[in-house]
Amino acid sequence: VLFHQPQGLTANGFEPFMLVIMAPWQRRFLLTLYTDVIGMDGTGSINSLRYELFTLCATDAGGRGVPFCHFVTATKTGEALTRMLRSVFLRVPSLAPHRVIIDMDDAEKVAVQNVSKELFGGKMEVRYCWFHVKDAVRRWMVKKGNKYVEAVQEKVFTFTAFICEVNYHFTEPNFSIKSGAPPSVLRPPPEVL
């Protein structure tokens, strides 16, 4: 157990349940994983109390994701995730990623940014998961229907090229700068074409 906070009233007000766990084998195995880039993802309603479960993953030598830490919480806020994520980095000082990939969740983004500023001088980047970006585009296209997509096919191609470039090398700080660029500037990397 890296961090535990029971749920209840304290002098500071109501405190939600929080638990961060890393098994001894996960801590040992972490030494063999590629941790320059880690992933963070969560799922809700894991029990009748609707607690959230978050997992941190790194990749092994074969490129497979391996979970190395889990958070369970009664609340999904940036503050709660910041406290739990901070506890991991403070208890495992050898873990110092340059990038954390998340699924476009605001609470996760806030937590990574807060911990980056507090512990890494703002040098830990937030990246968005390519699967979730593509899924959001797919859901948007299905919602609009085929006739709409056919009518704006060039715009869809431009948008897709833009998304490819976002995935290829964007970080959040320069996203807003590049997102205002004209379509001619947005070219997908050669391997996508």
Image (cartoon, grey):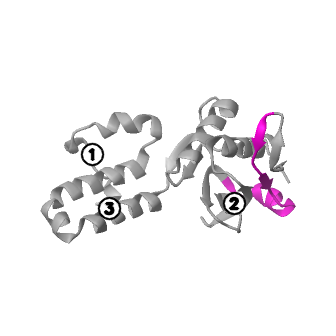
Which numbered circle lies on residue 39?
none
Dot in front, 3 or 1: 3
Which numbered circle lies on residue 51?
2
Using residue 86 as the reference point, say whether residue 181 is left or right of it. left
- Residue 101, percent from left and from top: 55, 51
* Residue beneath the point at 79% across and 53% down: 19
Identify whether 55 is placed above or below 115. Answer: below
Q: Amino acid at mark 1?
A: Leu
Q: What residue does disc 3 label?
A: 140
* Residue beneath the point at 58% across and 46% down: 107
53 or 135: nearer the viewer: 53
Residue 31 magenta-drawn? Answer: yes
Residue 38 magenta-drawn? Answer: no
Q: Which residues are magenta?
A: 12-34
Which quarter of the figure has residue 29? Answer: bottom right
Using residue 59 as the reference point, say whether residue 27 is left or right of it. right
Q: What residue does disc 1 label?
A: 186
Between the C-alphas of marks 3 and 1, the distance is: 21 Å
- Residue 40, percent from left and from top: 61, 54
Q: Amino acid at mark 2?
A: Tyr
136 or 183: nearer the viewer: 136
Considering only order in the chain, which callout, 1 or 2, is on the residue closer to the N terminus? 2
Identify whether 67 is placed above or below 84. Answer: below
Q: In which quadrant is the N terminus drawn?
A: bottom right
- Residue farthest to the left, as pictured: 151
Between the C-alphas of marks 2 and 1, the distance is: 41 Å
Dot in front, 3 or 2: 2
Which quarter of the figure has residue 179? Answer: top left
Between the C-alphas of marks 3 and 2, the distance is: 29 Å
159 or 187: nearer the viewer: 159
Q: Amino acid at mark 3?
A: Trp
Q: Label 2, secondary structure: give it.
A: loop
